Amino acid sequence: MIRKHFTLALIAGASVFASFAQAQEFKLGFVNTERIFREAATAKQAQAKLEQEFSRREKELVEAGNTLKLASEKFEREAPTLPESQRTARQKQLIDQDREFQRKRREFQEDLNARKNEEQQVVVERANRAVKQVAESEKYDVIFQEAVYINPKHDITEKVIKALNASAGK
């Protein structure tokens, strides 16, 4: 029942849209935002900035994880021969080290995600300005960013990337 109503509404909307487009010259475009995040110089610069900013902490985390893994493996090998008190103390020490490692890893991921969101927001704002610039200069009526299907002739992503890269050079 819902599918039938949705289909009817979709057909009605498409009919109105088609008749409007035929009555006037209607220019529409599509922008692939994923492609902008992959190819635009601004997005690449943001990614490089994040990698530079977080590479040291990531390396430290990897090293700490490897150290913890080696200590755990060593404990597993030696545990059967250790006195009970020593075994319990080392086990507690490993648990504490693991807890600290997990906390640092979680903090790293939260910090990285927050910075990534900040950098992506800058890219989105610049991309939106570039889309608006292309739309106004080429007299587009509508520009879509999300679509189930788009005819490649309406894809203006390349123009937007060029405009975005040109504005990044300034």
Image (spheres, rainbow, N blue to C red):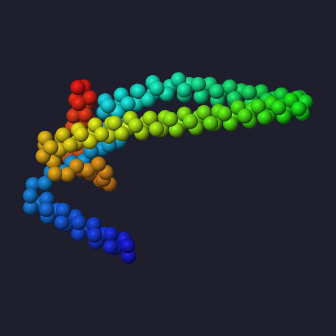
The residue under the point 20% across, 43% down is 132
Quadrant containing the C terminus is top left
Residue in the foreground of this view, choosing between 105 and 21: 105
Front in this rendered view, residue 8 or 119: 119
Q: Is residue 149 visible?
A: yes
The picture places residue 108, in percent across and down from the top left corner, at 54, 33
Q: Residue farthest to the left?
A: 24
Q: Is residue 112 above or below residue 29?
A: above
Q: Residue furthest bottom?
A: 1
Left or right: 19 as drawn, with respect to 4: left
The x and y percentages for residue 61 are 59, 28
| Residue that lies at the very extreme toward the right in this rendered image | 83
Q: Residue at x 44, y 35 (%)?
A: 115
Name the side, left or right, on which 26 lies relative to 161.
Answer: left
From the viewer's perspective, is 32 left or right of 91? left
Q: Is residue 157 visible?
A: no
Q: Quadrant of residue 76?
A: top right
The quarter of the rendered structure image containing the N terminus is bottom left
x, y (%) of residue 98? 69, 34
**Quarter of the figure with residue 43:** top left
Number of numbered callouts drawn: 0
Residue at point 24%, 47% (across, down): 30
Q: Residue at x 40, y 30 (%)?
A: 47
Image quadrant assignment for residue 34:
top left
Q: Position of residue 25 (x, y in %)?
A: 9, 54
